[in-house]
Image (cartoon, grey):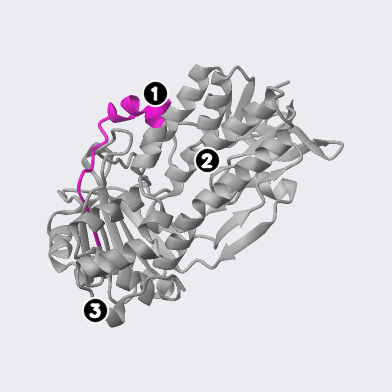
Amino acid sequence: MYDVIVVGARCAGSPLAMLLARQGHKVLVVDRATFPSDTVSTHYIHQAGLSRLKDWGILDRLVATGVPPMRHLTFSYTDIFLEGFADPIDGITEVYSPRRTVLDEILVDEARKAGAEVLEGFTVTEIVFDDGRAAGVRGRVGDGVEQVFRAPFVVGADGRNSTVATLVGAEIYRSIPAACFVYYSYFSGLDWPFQHRTGFGEQQFGAWPTHDGNHLLAVMRRRDRMREFRADIDGSFQEIFDQIVPELGADLRANGKRQENFRAMSYPDNFYRRSAGPGWALVGDAGYHKDPFTGWGITDALKYTEVLAEKLHEGLSGARPVDEAVAEYVKIRDAESNGTFELTCSIAELSLTPYYDSVFRATSLSPEYTTKFFGLIAGGISGEEFFAPSNLEKLYEEVDFPVDLRITTRP
């Protein structure tokens, strides 16, 4: 008998198991994968996410794997150009994009070191209920004998296509259609700083260094162009770099060498899913999923996993009813993530609204506000502060922005 069973052992599940085990709770975390193993991901961890790893005593271990630091970021939206970096967050002055084969194995190992039991290769087929409450899981390792594990609380940390969400009937209550598809792979032979470039024609590419001297290169286009893209994946991939930043396209053609197969991401719609019920909760992409454009998946998983761990501990320790405590986690997550969700869904359309065009165009003319922009991206400045009408009015005045283009209130 466990206190909590966590389904999914990647960047939400293992940290949750680790934090609860450190509090003295008996935790089982299961995953149908074995580790190390890969998964589709942007890899990017913002300063706010690295701050959580630092507080948990894990960041130094990640850095020691040789993942290259990034301290200069370049963003462009057609003819709007922004480059720089955020002010330090909790003393963190860089960001990283580790391979998931590396990051997830570290997180699984830290969960074990904390005292959690980790069962790899286990596929959940059923949530066990007692009197309407989740009370355990049923499943098997491979083709082995069916097993049942019991606990008074079950958490689904098993991604956007969550089995747990399906089995408990967790409905989606907010949804915004996904706009684009993504293709990415890993390339050697490049010496580029971080690039996040959106060009005319509603297309985008991103590039950032990761392990083993490689860069992750990713491209995005609108979904209605997927068939055209697939007709010549290599050519279409190269074309996007050529059209957005020709000099980088030329360097990619001359020096870039693809090291692995292309991976496609055709994401489901952006959503919030009911994430708490009698004896169960959802965390990470299982409960709240958004487009990869802003790279906030891992960071949000780490942030709100910590919130859920705190609330579960309150309930498991008897300080308050566990369902009441976990319901508060959902309220906190929804309130704090709303700005990131809305910004991501809007700019992932690959064409800026007049509001965002005005704000980002003015921002590019102000070194001080550019730093604030990167603070917004990094998680050090809230959207409420960055987009506050009074602050935008000051920005427009500072850069002498055309009066007829000033927009201070989001539509």
Which amino acid, by three-letter code, is at mark 3?
A: Pro
Disc 2/disc 3 C-alpha distance (Å): 40 Å
Which SS class for mark 2? helix
| Residue 72 x, y percent position in the rendering | 20, 48
In the picture as drawn, the residue positioned furthest to the bottom comes out as 404
Up-down relation of residue 280 to residue 56 (above or below): below
Residue at left offset 32%, top offset 38%: 89
Q: Using the image, tell me which numbered label, if any, was put on residue 304.
A: 2
Q: Is residue 72 left or right of residue 151?
A: left
Q: Quadrant of residue 222?
A: bottom left
Q: Is residue 21 left or right of residue 164?
A: left
Q: Residues within 10 Å of mark 3 (few under 14, many from 20)?
A: few
Name the N-terminal-most of marks 2 and 1: 1
Q: Using the image, tell me which numbered label, if any, was put on residue 38.
A: none
Q: Which residues are magenta?
A: 53-75
| Residue 227 x, y percent position in the rendering | 43, 73
- Residue tagged 1: 57
Q: Residues within 10 Å of mark 2 (few under 14, many from 20)?
A: many
Which amino acid, by three-letter code, is at mark 2?
A: Tyr
Which SS class for mark 3? loop
Which amino acid, by three-letter code, is at mark 1?
A: Gly
Disc 3/disc 1 C-alpha distance (Å): 49 Å
Disc 2/disc 1 C-alpha distance (Å): 18 Å
Label 3 vs label 1, nearer the camera: 3
Up-down relation of residue 229 to residue 21 (above or below): below
| Residue 69 x, y percent position in the rendering | 23, 38
Name the N-terminal-most of marks 3 and 1: 1
